Amino acid sequence: MDLRIKQLLDIASFSKEEIEEFLNLAENLKEILYRPIPKVPTLRGKLIVHLFYEPSTRTRFSFEKAAKTLSADTLTFTGKGTSIEKGETLLDTIKNLEAIGANLFVIRHPMAGAPHFIAKYSKVPVVNAGDGTHEHPTQALLDLLTVKEKLNTLSDLKVAIIGDIKHSRVAHSDILAFQKMGSNVYVAGPAQLLPDPKEEDYYKISKNGFKVCYKLEEALRDADVIITLRIQKERHEEVLIPSFLEYHEFFGLKPKHLELIKDKAILMHPGPINWGVELAYEMEKYPFQVILDQVENGVAIRMAVLLKLLTNEKGYESFN
Ligand code: CP
């Protein structure tokens, strides 16, 4: 199979086989990160431009680490101190950065669809690093990689995603990604933070693959994977929850919930975490939480994405 992938804009447009290619490549590349000198020359001479129009810790720095591990040059643009402050448009910014020599854009933007807009006009590959409430495809890939490593499978799992589903781009990518790999996704949260009933058909891409739950316990019962999410308050146009305290009371994950889930279940969170809101403080000490493993896998996944888009590498050779 020769899958020539030019862009990574969303999980929706990727097949199971294409997702597996990214995961296999990331698994091959991860070993580089443990070498005494974790660096290979594969992308020497390539210029990767990171456009972060929104704050980020994990995504931004793991993309930078991935690029540097592959010996690419990087420029990071956060809007501050650039001609955006003088009114330059996104399109003009892209054209100018291409003229400077960009070989690939990684973009995070508050507007859903911004990476798709850039991809339409850009001559070089574009990677969506999170666009508004739409999608965060590299987060879904690193979540899949983490589950595959920890549970040895991505099929026939019950994946519970808890929290602000409606406004979470991570949820939107994960719901599609886990179903594409053959698992079932149950989402739970306050009704006003769940997808509108008219959106449910979009998210249900396999028979029985997606279920909206109004009670936390229904989603958690016999779950293999629990993904908790931050309340995306910055994206709420009105007051949607009475208080974080009340949210924690009804939907925060606490030690008492452990009896509902499977013995080998894992707990995930894309970060940033608001301890005491979506997760009780006590959850930090439980070994079934794999939150920093997700962050580590973010570097390997982003190495795979950069390599695939810049070289169409299939990943079965060793990298020296
Ligand atoms: N998971 C994630 O996107 O985190 P950042 O916002 O810190 O990049």
Image (cartoon, grey):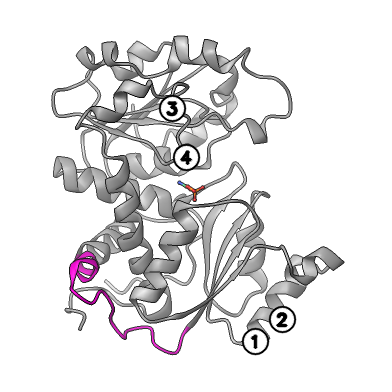
Q: Give x and y (percent) for residue 226.
A: 31, 29
> Mark 3 or mark 2, which is nearer the start of the sequence?
2
> What residue type is disc 1 on?
Ile
Give the number of callouts.
4
Quadrant including the C terminus = bottom left
* Pointer 4 residue Cβ closer than 8 Å to ligand 1: yes
Give the farthest residue toward the bottom: 45
Helix, strand or loop status at disc 3:
loop
- Between circles 1 and 3, the one closer to the viewer is 3
- Mark number, residue 85: none
Q: CA distance from mark 1 to mark 3?
A: 43 Å
Where residue 121 sits, quadrant-wise, is: bottom right
Closer to the observer: label 4 or label 1? 4
Say whether marks 1 and 2 touch (CB < 8 Å): yes
Residue 272 shows which numbered tag? 4
Location of the N terminus by quadrant is: bottom left
Q: Amino acid at mark 4?
A: Pro
Q: Label 2: which residue?
A: 96
